[in-house]
Image (tube, helix red, strand yellow):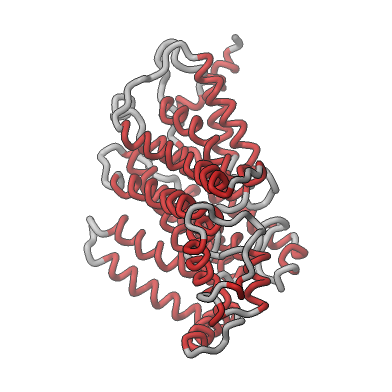
């Protein structure tokens, strides 16, 4: 084989993206293609329709090829319980759909489409874990680049935002989802500064800070209150995770600075002031028995509807797009309105866990909760691990899960195929790095 081809194939190992293979256990070509797929799937996640969906199947093919072609696969597992927990968690959405449809006595294949992305991520997770890819080192460049592309999509395609009264969006991603994910990706940029053994170059640090700034800018321009709430929670969490040991008072200083920044944004940015002021006013009016059909009021009512519908059908749930007449349910009648029924029927319940509960009953509740709790607990437990690669993946993973969980209290964050694909691959890759073989990385 020509020398330059050999040099290309050895790049993943030289750059530290994957562990050196033992004889007969891996293909350099497969490693190279896998590294490219891991780098590319987040790149155009929010700016090119179906981009991330394709990479679920590409990485699945890589996993199958690895299983079929390698003569020796690592059969040992330092953390078998955690491996099973992540695998079952990723499989849980499709199991929830299956059991709820079983109790309804009807099967609709289209309902399995989005949840299947999580199931397909299971062999990807096992493959990446077996080969010990350093995913965080791969994406520390990609996430800020992805945000730069998101900024370009917002600035140079104003037609997309015009559909949302000028609020930031892309041509296929709504303004709330766009703002939330850009914000969380921006905070991942912040968390990834100096996350590897090697010191970040000045250029890379600048790139990550630029990604952070873009994330905040798009979150503000999207006027997404879910993004702002996630930002506050993540900034507090990050300050304690990264600063508490060396500087015990620093996290509290960051909390104060964060609060001052939020107050400044409220006072100086009209859109922030308008959205927060409106939300506070609508919550007060709602608690006093009025303002039921405002933006905030409908969101509160949707949460209440979600709880009542789960109680109405705890095992079977309700088929997508098929709900009972809400005014026929006595517990919903006190806050019922025609507008509320229209929004709920058209857009569904805006809280991820409750929405999955309505769709699949208690099975959906368990699955949607597990998708946050299981990987979140795993990442939290490894935040102070002595292995740097494990620690890096744990921090990025915890930021991702915590940010989406906070946002999921008011919106759905992985109910669509592209959001399912992104979250499934991120959890698979980060969990694989957190659970990598200790003998390969000391």
Q: Is residue 156 visible?
A: yes
Q: Quadrant of the N terminus?
A: top right
| Relative depth, front residue between 290 and 17 | 290
Query: How many marks overall?
Result: 0
Please provide percent x and percent y for residue 303: 51, 69
Please provide percent x and percent y for residue 421: 58, 44
| Relative depth, front residue between 296 and 338 | 338
> Which residue corresponds to the image point at 71% horizontal and 73% vertical from the top-left?
165
- In this view, the residue farthest toward the right is 159
| Relative depth, front residue between 324 and 42 | 324
Q: Is residue 8 left or right of residue 77?
A: right
> Which residue corresponds to the image point at 66% horizontal and 58% vertical from the top-left?
321
Q: Is residue 116 above or below residue 264?
A: above
Q: Is residue 269 above or below residue 192?
A: below
Q: Quadrant of the C terminus?
A: top left
Please provide percent x and percent y for residue 171: 73, 57
> Which residue corresponds to the image point at 50% horizontal and 48% vertical from the top-left?
203
Please provide percent x and percent y for residue 425: 52, 41
| Relative depth, front residue between 94 and 391 | 94
Q: Is residue 326 above or below residue 248?
A: below
> Which residue corresponds to the image point at 61% horizontal and 43% vertical from the top-left?
112
Q: Is residue 82 above or below residue 67?
A: below
In which quarter of the view is residue 386 placed?
top left
Q: Is residue 188 visible?
A: no
């Amino acid at each position: 084989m020509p020398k330059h081809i050999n040099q290309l194939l050895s790049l993943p190992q030289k750059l530290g993206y994957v562990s050196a293979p033992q004889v007969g256990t891996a293909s350099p070509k497969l490693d190279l293609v896998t590294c490219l797929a891991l780098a590319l799937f987040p790149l155009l996640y929010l700016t090119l329709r179906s981009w991330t969906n394709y990479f679920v199947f590409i990485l699945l093919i890589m996993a199958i090829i690895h299983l079929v072609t390698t003569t020796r696969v690592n059969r040992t597992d330092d953390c078998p319980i955690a491996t099973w927990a992540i695998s079952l968690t990723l499989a849980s959405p499709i199991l929830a759909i299956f059991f709820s449809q079983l109790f309804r006595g009807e099967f609709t294949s289209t309902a399995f489409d989005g949840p299947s992305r999580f199931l397909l991520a299971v062999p990807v997770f096992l493959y990446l874990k077996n080969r010990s890819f350093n995913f965080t080192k791969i994406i520390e460049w990609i996430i800020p680049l992805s945000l730069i592309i998101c900024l370009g999509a917002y600035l140079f395609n104003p037609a997309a935002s015009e559909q949302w009264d000028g609020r930031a969006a892309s041509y296929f991603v709504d303004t709330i989802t766009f703002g939330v994910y850009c914000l969380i990706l921006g905070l991942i940029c912040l968390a990834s500064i100096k996350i590897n053994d090697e010191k970040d170059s000045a250029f890379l640090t600048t790139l990550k800070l630029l990604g952070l700034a873009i994330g905040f800018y798009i979150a503000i321009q999207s006027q997404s209150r879910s993004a702002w709430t996630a930002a506050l929670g993540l900034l507090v969490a990050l300050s304690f995770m990264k600063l508490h040991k060396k500087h015990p008072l620093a996290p509290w200083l960051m909390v104060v600075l964060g609060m001052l920044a939020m107050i400044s944004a409220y006072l100086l940015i009209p859109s922030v002031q308008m959205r927060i002021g409106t939300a506070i006013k609508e919550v007060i009016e709602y608690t006093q028995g009025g303002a039921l059909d405002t933006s905030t009021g409908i969101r509160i009512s949707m949460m209440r509807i979600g709880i009542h519908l789960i109680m109405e059908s705890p095992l079977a749930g309700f088929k997508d797009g098929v709900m009972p007449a809400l005014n026929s349910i006595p517990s919903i009648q006190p806050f019922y309105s025609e507008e509320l029924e229209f929004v709920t029927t058209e857009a569904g319940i805006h809280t991820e866990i409750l929405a999955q509960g309505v769709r699949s009953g208690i099975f959906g509740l368990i699955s949607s909760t597990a998708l946050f709790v299981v990987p979140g607990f795993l990442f939290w437990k490894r935040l102070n691990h002595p292995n740097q690669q494990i620690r890096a993946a744990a921090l990025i993973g915890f930021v991702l899960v915590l940010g989406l969980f906070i946002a999921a209290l008011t919106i759905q964050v992985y109910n669509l195929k592209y959001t399912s694909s992104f979250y499934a691959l991120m959890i698979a890759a980060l969990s694989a790095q957190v659970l990598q073989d200790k003998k390969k990385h000391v």
